[in-house]
């Protein structure tokens, strides 16, 4: 401990606050607050600045499942203590709107930490579960080419969709 400590009034009495110079945190153990006690215990810099907490839009963390979260406390879909899945936030930025409850974001390459827009695709999880938006649109066009009005049948039959395979592009 390089910096001088304040003198205790009475050694036999526990101090009310940390004895480290300039610190007003409550007493924890051996004359120090919990922060300074742990810094002394770990051998780290006792005078290092105290972290104030996550910075909105900048601070990130990675879950044990490999997903990256970004700290956005004012986001309407923020999870526990203001954290938002970064892949969902990136997709929202690309779309220019918040995601709806039935929309999911899928990582094309399977890497949950790779949140580049080109690696993400929007999926709809209402009926049927887990299909790509592009596949659902192709399927809808195929249905219209078979069952739509005469105008719709002509329009979507001419678009070159495969009438034998639902979704056409799979």
Image (cartoon, rainbow, N blue to C red):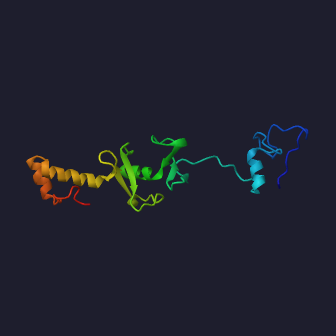
Of 83 and 124, nearer the camera is 124
Residue 109 in view (yes/no): yes
Q: Position of residue 99 (x, y in %)?
A: 38, 45
Of 20 and 153, nearer the camera is 153
> Quarter holding the N terminus?
bottom right
Q: Residue at x 64, y 46 (%)?
A: 52
> Quarter holding the C terminus?
bottom left
Q: Position of residue 13 (x, y in %)?
A: 88, 37
Q: Is residue 20 above or below residue 9?
A: below
Q: Residue at x 77, y 53 (%)?
A: 41
**From the viewer's perspective, is 125 left or right of 160?**
right
**From the viewer's perspective, is 163 left or right of 37?**
left
Q: Residue at x 13, y 56 (%)?
A: 157
Q: Give residue 132's quadrant in the image.
A: bottom left
Residue 72 in view (yes/no): no
Q: Residue at x 88, y 41 (%)?
A: 8
Of 108 and 43, nearer the camera is 108
- How many numbered discs? 0
Q: Looking at this view, name the residue that lies furthest to the left.
A: 150
Q: Looking at this view, name the residue that lies furthest to the bottom.
A: 109
Q: Position of residue 26 (x, y in %)?
A: 76, 39
Q: Position of residue 33 (x, y in %)?
A: 77, 44
**From the viewer's perspective, is 155 left or right of 118?**
left
């Amino acid at each position: 401990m390089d910096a001088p400590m304040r003198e205790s009034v009475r050694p036999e009495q526990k101090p009310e606050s940390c004895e480290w110079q300039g610190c007003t945190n409550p007493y924890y153990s051996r004359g120090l607050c919990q922060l300074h006690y742990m810094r002394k215990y770990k051998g780290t810099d006792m005078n290092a600045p105290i972290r104030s907490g996550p910075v909105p839009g900048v601070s990130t963390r990675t879950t044990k499942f490999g997903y990256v979260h970004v700290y956005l406390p004012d986001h309407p879909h923020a999870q526990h203590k203001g954290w938002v899945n970064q892949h969902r936030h990136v997709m929202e930025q690309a779309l220019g709107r918040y995601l709806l409850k039935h929309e999911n974001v899928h990582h094309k390459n399977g890497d949950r930490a790779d949140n580049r827009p080109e690696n993400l695709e929007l999926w709809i999880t209402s009926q049927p579960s887990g299909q790509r938006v592009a596949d659902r649109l192709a399927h809808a066009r195929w249905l219209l080419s078979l069952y739509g009005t005469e105008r719709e049948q002509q329009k979507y039959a001419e678009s070159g969709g495969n009438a034998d395979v639902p979704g056409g592009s799979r």
